[in-house]
Structure formats: C-alpha cells, structure tokens
Image (cartoon, rainbow, N blue to C red):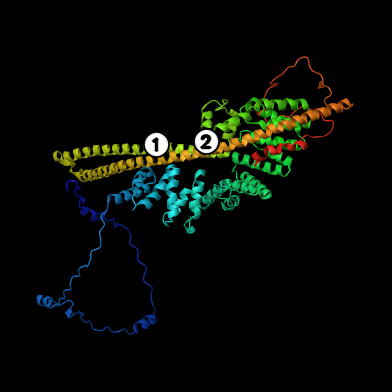
Amino acid sequence: VTKIPKLDIGLEKSISKNDFMPTELSVDFNVNKKLSALESPKLHSNKEIAKIATQKLPLVDKAKMPTKNGVELGSMVSLKRIQDVPLDMLETKVLEQLKPYSEVTNDDLGMITAVILLEKKDKCHLASGLLSILADKKKYAEEANFYLGVCAHQMGFHSEAVSRLVKVVVSEHAEYVPDAITNLVEDLPREYDAKVATAIKGLKNTNLIPAAAKDNMNFVLARAAHEKSSYAEATKYAAKVSESSKRYRDARYIYGIALYAQKKLKESEMALLALRDWMVKKNKGDKNIEALIAVNLARMRFTQARYQAAHDEYMKVPKDHPLWVQALVEQGWAQLSVDDAEGAIGNMYSLHSPYFKSVFTPESWVVRTIGYIDICQYGDAYKTLTKLEQLHGGWKSSVDRYRTSKKKPLEYYDTVKNYIRGRSDQDIDGLPHQVIREIARQRGFLNAQGAINVLEDEIAQYAHIYRLIKKDQLDLVAKVEASKKRLVKINEDLNKIKSNPDLVKFKNEWSAQKRNEERLVRSYNYQKVVYEVARKGFVGLKNKAFTRIESDKGNFRTLAGKELMSHLKDIQTRIGNIVEGNEFLRYEIFSGSGENIRYQVSGGTTADAKRIPANIKPQKILNWEFDGEYWEDEIGSYRSTLKNNCPKNARAAQVYDRGLKTTAKNEK
C-alpha cells in the first residue's frame, strides 16, 4: 500500500469578480454635439390605411389551465397530493453470470510498451529487446515476430528481418502480410532472393500484396528467377517493373540479359539499346551497367559475325571496369576477324605491359601470336608463343596438383583468403597468384563473398545498436537527476513562504511545478525499468542472431568454395586448350615460314625485304625483355607497326578458327 502514489486531483479553479466587470467603465458622451433630425417614416395614403384597417382580426380562445395526471400546473402542491401519487417499485434484475475478467499481465504491459515505443519512430532498438522476449511466447509470437521483423529491417539486420517476416508472409495474416512484404522487398540483399521469392509465390491470397510494393517485389522475383536460370520467368517479372521505380534500370538490364540467355538475340539487343537510350535521356547513367551493356552487345554481334559492330561496343568498356581486360581480349578476336591484325597485336601488347603482370591473360598471347601469323611475321609469332610457354607452361601442372590435393570447398576458400591477406604477387598452396586472382574475380564467388560481408556488417551493426541502448539509459539517468535537482529547488521555494508571506502569490505556480516534476520522476523511473528489460532482451536477441549468422556464414563460405572449385576446373580446361593449341600454332608458324622462304627463294619479294633471313645465324644475340616506355593513358590504344609480310592474303585465322573454341565457355 505504501508504494501506491497519493492521488492528486489538483486545485479547484478559482473565479474572480473581476472576470465579470466591463472592460471600460466610462461612457464617452459629447453634449456639445449638434443634434440632427432623424428621417421621417414613409407616409402611406388613406387608401392603403383603409385597406389595412378594414381587415378582421381572428379571435383567440380563452386560455385554459393545462393539467397532467390530475395535477393542475400552477396550483398548490400539498403533502397529501404527494402521498396519493402511486409508486410502483420495479424488481431489481440480478445478472445471472458475471462476465469473465482478465487481469492485465506483465506481458500485456510489455506489448503495450513496445507498441508505444514503435510509435515514436526512433525507438526500434529498445522495442526490439521487448519484442524478442515476447516472440518466444505463444500468445504474442505472431504479432511480436511481425513488429520485430519490421524493426530489424529498419536497423539493418537483414538476416533477422528475413527470418521473422518470411514466417509472417507464410502465415497469410491479413493485418501483417502487406507491411511484411513491403519491408522484405525493400533493398533486399540478393542472397535472400530465393527464400523471399518462395514465400511470396506461395501466397494463396494475392490481394494481400500492396500495390506500392509490387515494383520492388517483381524485381526481387526477376532476380531470383535469373539466378536459378529460369530466364523466361525472369523476363516476365522484370517486364512488370514500372518506369517510376528506382529498380527500373536494373530490372530492364535483367530483362535484356534474360532474353539473351533464351537465344532471342534480336529482342535482347533492342532491349539493351533501349535501356542505354533511356539512361541517357533520363540522366540515370551507371558506369557498371553501361559497361555490361557494351560487353553483352559486343558478344551478341560477334556471334552473328558482325565483327566491326562488336569491336565498336568493346571500345565503350571503360578501363577502370573489372571486365575491361576480358573485353580487350575479346576485342582482339574481333579485330582479327576484320583483318586488323595490327590493332589486335597492339591491344595484346597493352595487356603484356607491367601493369597486368598479375592478371590471368594467357589467351591474349594466343591472340597476339595469331596476329603475327596473319601478317606473316613468323619470327615474332614464334617469340610470342615461346613467351607464352615460359610464362604459363607450369600453370597447368600446378593446377593439376592443386585439384588433386584439395578436395574440400573450404580448402579452396582458405587459399583465396590467405592470398588476399598477403602480397598480391605471392603464390599460395602452389597455385599461381594470377590463377587465384582469376577464380576470385568471378561473379559466383563474389556474390557468395558479398553475402558474407553483409553478415559481417550486420554483426557490427548489433554492437552499434547496443551502444544506442546504453546511451538512452545514460540519458535517462541524467534526466532523473536533473528533475530531482529541480524538485529540491521548488521545495526550498515553498518553504520560504512560511517566513515571507509576500511569496504566497507564487504558491500555486510552485505547487504545480512540483506536481509536474514528481510526475516526471515517476515516468523516468518506469522508463528505466523498461530500458533495462529491453537491454537484456536485446542481448538475448543478439546472441541468438550471432549463432544463426555464424551458421549462415559457414554455408556461404562453403558455397564460395564450391564456386572457386568450379572456376578452377574451368581454368584447367582453358589452359589445357591453350597448351593443345600451342602445338597447332607452332606447326602453323613453321609451315608458314617455310612457305614464305620457298616463296622468296623462287624470286618473290615481301614487304620487309631488309629483314635478316632465317637461314643466317647472327654473331651476337641481344635480348631485351622490354623496349620503350608504357604510358598508362595509352594502354589499350597501341597498334603494331609491323608490315604485312605475306606473299598473298592467306590468313592463319581461316585454319585456326580464331580461337573461338578456346573462349566459347568463357563467353557464355
């Protein structure tokens, strides 16, 4: 009983006679003012007066005294008359059964408190702690999971939000599902696309999907479909994203690429060109998407033998884009196909500069070799082929040994992790660093590693949110102390009234301030209890989340390792094809040079008549690994100055098939 606060109903409102006094007590009357005659009323004619005067007035009946129940109004009321009034007492009705009464529990108060905190918009970090406790209780699980999922989304806990809100969507609760979908599909990391897409596509009542969330939802569905190679489905959903959506640009890119994957080259090309025009018109440029559009348009046109058009698109890929090196190699094949061997040689020369010594580019040496063969510069072709074998000869055996000894995905992942931690030119586990860089730059691995990075950021976000809770607790303590200091001052002022009657006029004001401060202290003390419960609840939520996140990180590491295994297998095949092709190129060099010698012996001339014949061995051999200087801004713009030394336009590419078999899988 002593803990029950005293009831304070406040002071009775006082009324002063001054409230009813007129505001001005004097009347301003100027007696000296000259009086003016008022306007006379309008005169009527005798005829008009006679017409009115002759009308008969209706007679009114004599008034009668009204009566009710035998008692005349206005008459004297005697005691006898009152006693003679019949009184019929009605029987009191007793309720047969009282309605059940449910006492408000602490959990009820907890849910009410959580909802109040949510309404404040910036207290999700506190509400989440309370909701995490209630989510484990059957009565509140559904509602608490919904609010906790929304809060998790706002705080950047993507895995927590997906874990909670997907359950809400599956439940098809009419009150919660619309907001759950809205939060799920807003800025969803791609690693959760499949789980969210499955939940949304499983909805029986599609009317629960809010119209405002459909653009984001269709984008997520399109991305999920594309990831599992369901390209027709990806096209369908991507086409539904409206132009007003912030996802429109990415959705249209998915739409175009999905058409390409369905071998609808014409439709795909038109879609990507339309997207490029739209980005320019709307000033919605994006360097990454622009580069991707250029590369894919170039590949489409290359497969259609539109080599010059393909070359023009490859030229649009910026040098600072991750695909530039690959695009330059593919551009070399296009140049060879349009009889521009000098340009292809020059571009590959760019890739063989010191800037790219750690980049996996064996195919560029093949392009350069074929370029030399095309212009019958067999000495340079042989030198380039020899350089290729020197640089990459041991790679195949290294990859073979690695794949034989490493069988688990996590071993591959650890190799890449150790490489990233060390020097960029350091081989790891017997695997060349160029090969490690190549397998680690592929989309599959990068997506899996990106998911791990998101989870790492989420762990850091939990620490940040916990600091916010502690800050709110400290701020609350400061507010309590400040309020108590003000109470001490008010009490001191009230005590002064006893010795100084002149201060009595402030009594009501100070008393009101005292009541307000006492109310604040009670409120702050209650909030302190709530904040501490919220803090403990958040710690529990964090511990459970960390357990789930560590499990998810392990799954993504395994997935990343599997992607590395697949990429390394692909590289092993590519290197094998190149090594096999080297023997063929060597044959072409010897065959072509022999033909050229026979041509010259028979009296023919070539463009470079001053070159030393192959049958003359020089007295001194001088080898330069590097001649001239490389300028960064000139990379990708070099052209060979060697002249075509062929006796006729017989091109090696007609025999070698342009190396397309080597790049077919990579191009896909």
The label on residue 408 is 2
Camera-near label (2 vs 1) is 2
Residue 67 % position (x, y): 20, 80
User: Given the image, on which type of amino acid does mark 2 rest?
Assistant: Lys
In the rendered view, tell whether residue 483 sits above or below residue 356. below
* Whether residue 245 can be seen here: no
The residue most toward the right is 603
Using the image as rendered, state which of residue 321 and residue 546 is in the foreground. 546
Circle 2/circle 1 CB separation < 8 Å: no
Using the image as rendered, state which of residue 172 and residue 657 is in the foreground. 657
Instruction: Categorize mark 1 by other alpha carbons within 10 Å: few (<14), some (14-19), many (20+).
Output: few
First reached walking from the N terminus: tag 2 or tag 1: 2
In the rendered view, tell whether residue 302 sits above or below residue 88. above
Is 609 placed left or right of 632 in the picture? right
Examine the image and state in which quarter residue 605 appears.
top right
User: Given the image, on which type of amino acid does mark 1 rest?
Assistant: Ala
The residue most toward the top is 619
Quarter occupied by the C terminus: top right
Q: Which residue is mark 1?
A: 463
Q: CA distance from mark 2 to mark 1?
A: 33 Å
The label on residue 72 is none
| Disc 2 element | loop
Residue 85 % position (x, y): 14, 77
Examine the image and state in which quarter residue 371 appears.
top right
Using the image as rendered, state which of residue 433 and residue 290 is in the foreground. 433
Using the image as rendered, state which of residue 485 and residue 139 is in the foreground. 139
Residue 258 % position (x, y): 61, 48
Residue at 79%, 34% in the rendered image: 651
Is 132 placed left or right of 331 in the picture? left
Residue at 37%, 36% in the rendered image: 467
